[in-house]
Image (cartoon, rainbow, N blue to C red):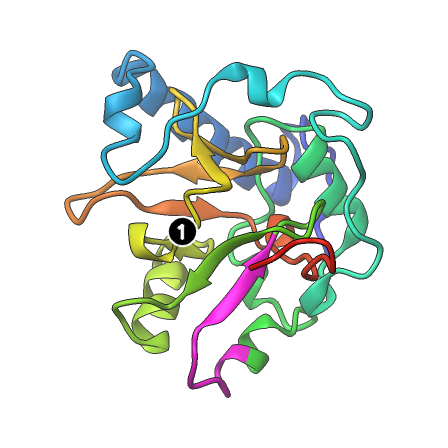
Amino acid sequence: NIVTTDLRSEKGIKGTNMNLRSVVTSFLGFLGGANPEKYCSPPCVPGDESIMKPKEHGTSHTPVQPNLRWNCDNTLADRICNFNRHYAENSGYFEENDISFLSEVKKMENPEKFYDSNTGKLLFTAPSGRTWKEFLEESHRHGWPSFRDDEVNWDVVRILPNGETVSIDGTHLGHNLPDKAGNRLCINLVSIAGNPSSSVED
């Protein structure tokens, strides 16, 4: 089912899942003392709070595109991308039956490009340095599409001191949750389901 629970809600399974990720990332931020180096080791590009200052549409200049890829829900996407700093789509959202992401990428042999749901700017190209099977297995383990350094367009993606991962235009993407292999960007599918903008060069 499409997640429609209020992102601030603490009731219901979907609300609990979203709050769990918020608690985890907040706790990690506390342990790290909001240390940029903890969440942004090279080649990561750090950002600051000014990126997410209020704009015409929440933290962004525009709402999400009207026809997002993979049948992603626009209402959910707009709330997560533009009016949210901590919460996430439901764990496993990218694997749900009414989301076409898995069925499409399982047929692919080449890397896929993932675009900002607001601006259409290129954010990620994956998989890189691994197979689709490895990318999907890691994403499945963690519940959200998970990207490594070589898959990130660091010209557009920034990591804030508490690990929040955003675009330079103010789109909330997810969080960086590093592990022993390095940076692991845990990203909402609804945030990267945009179509490439005709005015943006890849």
Q: Residue at x 55, y 28 (%)?
A: 86
Does residue 49 lie above or below 56 as drawn? above
Side of 27 relative to 117 (left or right): left
Side of 61 relative to 90 (left or right): right
Residue 15 drawn at (x, y percent): 63, 37
Closer-to-camera residue (183/167): 167
Closer-to-camera residue (182/25): 182
User: Which contiguous range is marked in magenta?
Assistant: 105-115
**Which residue is at the far top?**
33
Does residue 187 lie above or below 171 as drawn? below
Side of 185 relative to 48 (left or right): left
Q: Residue at x 34, y 14 (%)?
A: 34
Q: Give yes or no for residue 110 being in the magenta stretch.
A: yes
Side of 167 relative to 39 (left or right): right
Q: What is the quadrant of the C terminus in the image?
A: bottom right
Q: Which residue is mark 1?
A: 152
